[in-house]
Amino acid sequence: MQTLNLDFSNLIVIEDSLYSKWHTFDVMPRDYLMFAREDRRSDGVRGAINSITNAKRAIDCQNKVVQNALFGDSISKQLREYVDLYSSAKKEESFDLRMISSFNLAPIGLISKVRKIRHKIEHEFKIPNQTEVEDAVELAELFINCIENKIKIVTSFELTDVAHFDADDHRGKISGYYVSYEEKEIHIQSHGQTDKFTKNDPEFFFLAALMVNLESDKDYFSRKLAEFSVKHLGQKDNAKIKVVEWSPF
């Protein structure tokens, strides 16, 4: 990848385009959430058990929607390596939840309680109480809301610096790195050169993490950008890398 003479202590990030990227199934997460709410209103053991089961299905379905939207229905070796390296979830958690954690899409602590309640039903054959049912449905809804907010992907942005950026004469010009999400690829353009990354490349997942967090978590974006700059853009000290301005295109 081409190395540019940018001042990484005075970076500007210019957001270009934003859209919600979804993969659809016949039954979607909010359908299962609706079933969980309806079951919650039913009296008796069957309603309680079905409510928790559908709350977990809502979470599992949401995980699959994210995975398929970002990476397709297959899991590459590089994705597994990225998840193993960056997930804060415990190793015994499912790959889906560790993936959500590794891309900073939702707090995994939200889900552990639902799984524990469902484990009691499936393996210990215990009846959940009303509080556990309420918690499961509310946590599933919170998880879905969190993911839906995060998955508003910035599909392209430019990384430049204060010295090279001209706000009055910028449209149509690239003064730094221009990062764009194409179908199944992420491109980086700089000075007429284009580098292309697929899900078989480690860089792809770093860039995907940047794109899904730029709109919603600039703190995380900044930390991830610093790490990417050291690993792939020739920078020596991530402590000196700083975004000083965020700008719409």
Image (spheres, helix red, strand yellow):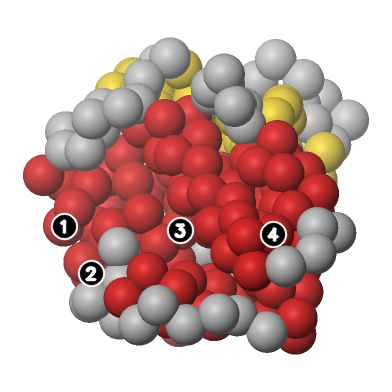
Closest to the observer, 221 or 83? 83
Q: Earlier in the sequence, mark 2 or mark 3?
A: 2
Mark closer to the observer (4, 3): 4
Q: CA distance from mark 2 to mark 4?
A: 40 Å
- Disc 1 designates what residue? 81
> Could you tell me residue 19's position as x and y percent?
71, 27
Q: Is residue 225 left or right of residue 244?
A: left
Nearer the camera: disc 3 or disc 1: 3
**Residue 91 x, y percent position in the rendering:** 22, 77
Name the mark on residue 47: 4
Tell me the CA gap for discs 4 and 3: 29 Å
* Local SS, label 4: helix
Give the mark nearer the N terminus: 2 vs 4. 4
Task: Tell us which disc is closer to us: 1 or 4.
Answer: 4
Q: Kindly report the distance in space between the C-alpha atoms of the residues bearing marks 1 and 4.
A: 40 Å
Closer to the N terminus: mark 1 or mark 4?
4
Q: Going 70% across and 30% down the picture, which residue do you hit? A: 20
Query: Which quadrant of the view contains residue 77?
Result: top left
From the viewer's side, name the closer residue of 81 and 125.
125
How far apart, in angstroms, are the residues tagged by discs 2 and 3? 13 Å
Q: Which of the two discs, 2 and 3, sits closer to the camera? A: 3
| CB-based contact (under 8 Å), mark 2 and mark 1 | yes
Whether pointer 2 and pointer 4 mark residues with C-beta atoms closer than 8 Å, the reply is no
Image x and y of residue 67, in percent: 41, 39
What type is the residue that disc 1 sits on? Glu
Q: Which mark is residue 100?
A: 3
- What amino acid is found at the position of numbered circle 3 in the picture? Ile
The residue where tag 2 is placed is 85
